[in-house]
Amino acid sequence: MTPKTRPRAAGGCSLDQLTAGEQGVIETVDCTPVVARRLMELGLVPGTSIELVRRAPLGDPIEIAVRGVRLSLRRAEARKIHVTTG
C-alpha cells in the first residue's frame, strides 16, 4: 500500500478511491444540501453509472464520465460520493 492509496471495503468506496478506467454506481451523495443539490443537477444521482476517466498530475481534480458527459470534480467533493463497484 502506497501513502496515496487507502484500503477499500469490498464492493463499495468513495469516488476518489476509484482508479482510472474503473466504473461504479452511485449509492449516496453525502455532503451539505447546497453542494449535494449542485452535484445532483450535474447528473450525479444515486443509481447512476459513473466512471473515473483520469486524474490531474497532482491528483486533483479528477475527470469523471457520467450520462455521456465528462465532468471535473475536486477530490474533496468526490470523497463525499459513495459508489459500489463490480
Image (cartoon, helix red, strand yellow):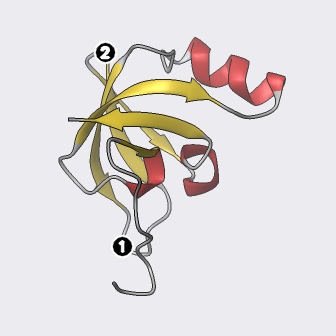
Q: Position of residue 41 (x, y in %)?
A: 59, 13
Query: Element type at marker 2?
Result: loop
Circle 1: is it few (<14), some (14-19), or many (20+) Cα within 10 Å? few
Quarter holding residue 31: top right
Q: Quadrant of residue 11?
A: top left
Q: Amino acid at mark 1?
A: Pro
Within 10 angstroms of label 2, few (less than 14), some, or many (20 or more) residues?
A: few
Query: In the picture shown, does residue 75 fall above or below 83?
Result: below
Question: In which image quadrant can residue 75 be found?
Answer: bottom right
Q: Which residue is mark 1?
A: 57
Determine which residue is flagged by label 2.
67
Residue 68, above or below 19: above
Q: Residue at x 40, y 58 (%)?
A: 8
Q: Which dot marks residue 43? A: none
How many marks on residues?
A: 2
Above or below: residue 31 compared with residue 61: above
